[in-house]
Image: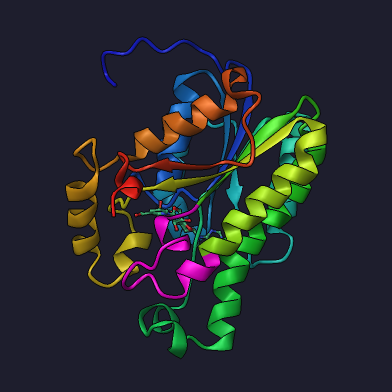
Amino acid sequence: MNDVQLRPVLEGRKALVIGVANADSIAYGCAKAFRSVGADLAVTWINEKARRFVEPLAQDLGASITGAVDVSAPGQLEAIFDQIRSKWGRLDILVHSIAFAPKEDLQGGLLNCSAEGFAKAMDVSCHSFVRMAKLAAPLMTEGGSMFAMSYYGANRVVANYNVMGPVKAALEAVCRYLAYELGPQGIRVHAISPGPLKTRAASGLKDFELMLNEAAHKAPLGELVDIMDVGYTCAYLATPFARRVTGELVYVDGGANLVA
Ligand SMILES: NC(=O)c1ccc[n+]([C@@H]2O[C@H](COP(=O)([O-])OP(=O)(O)OC[C@H]3O[C@@H](n4cnc5c(N)ncnc54)[C@H](O)[C@@H]3O)[C@@H](O)[C@H]2O)c1
């Protein structure tokens, strides 16, 4: 992508990106891609411990709004949207790139996942997108686009993906229903399904290296994806070039999902 001349097709557009933990995060790829085509950024970190990794990245990208958002902490989502309302007065793009399941519930297979662990995974990784969409929609006064990160394990059984499979399936359904409900306001909603990427969240999955090897082997395009591939896909979908596209599940996996 280095030799591609990028035009500022999202110049002046306002993007909130939730889920940057470090420079490997898919959310960071999204923020960087949006910025590279002219968007203004709001970037969040989950807590003070993460802030020292995320704040310098946000500063490098010239983010004009930053703050803490733990979707489990009452009031924090509302607070970042308050900042956006008072500073920008509107929003064009929302990225939900977060997931969580307690380790013991994630690694023990679905049958052994506790009710509390299931509910926690569902709340942080899925329902929080509904909460964000509800806060974002009134600010998308000129229409907008929303993205949530899913994975192939939502639709096919992937060994060791366990409780995250049903959770991502719910997230994909949420995207379709939000696309339906928000379409009349010109707001488009997509689930993005990246191939496996070496990130902190992925390190919680057992035998993740095997998933990486299999994905590279299966993909017709022959390579693993990187975070900028995901970011540029979201950037394209946020432009008017994709203005009639909504409610899609978009694989960014080199075509691996096509191959049995
Ligand atoms: N890495 C992969 O192979 C892969 C593939 C497909 C989809 N995804 C999805 O992409 C998304 C981003 O993950 P990633 O791989 O970039 O890993 P990551 O570890 O960089 O990002 C996960 C983010 O979730 C955030 N998070 C967790 N609990 C939170 C909470 N309560 N409130 C706010 N934020 C919270 C973390 O702080 C972190 O920033 C996730 O939804 C993940 O399931 C990842």
Q: Which residues are magenta?
A: 150-167
At 76% from the left and 33% from the top, the residue drawn is 140
| Residue 157 is inside the magenta segment | yes
The relative height of residue 7 versus residue 22 in the rendered view (above or below) is: above
The relative height of residue 111 versus residue 226 in the rendered view (above or below) is: below
Residue 81 lies, in percent from the top left, at 73, 44
At 59% from the left and 31% from the top, the residue drawn is 64
Left or right position of 120 against 184: left
Residue lying at the far front in this picture: please name it.
260
Q: Is residue 255 visible?
A: yes
Q: Quadrant of residue 66?
A: top right
Q: Is residue 82 visible?
A: no
Quarter of the N terminus within the rendering: top left
Q: Quadrant of residue 228?
A: top left
Picture quadrant of ligand 1:
bottom left
Residue 117 lies, in percent from the top left, at 53, 81
Q: Quadrant of residue 146?
A: top right
At 66% from the left and 49% from the top, the residue drawn is 176
Q: What colour scheme governs how the chains and residues are painted in the rendered image of this protein?
A: rainbow
Residue 10 lies, in percent from the top left, at 57, 19
Left or right position of 155 against 221: right
| Residue 93 is inside the magenta segment | no
At 47% from the left and 61% from the top, the residue drawn is 154
Near-viewer residue (125 or 248): 248
Near-viewer residue (83 or 112): 112
The relative height of residue 34 versus residue 26 in the rendered view (above or below) is: above
Left or right position of 107 against 141: left
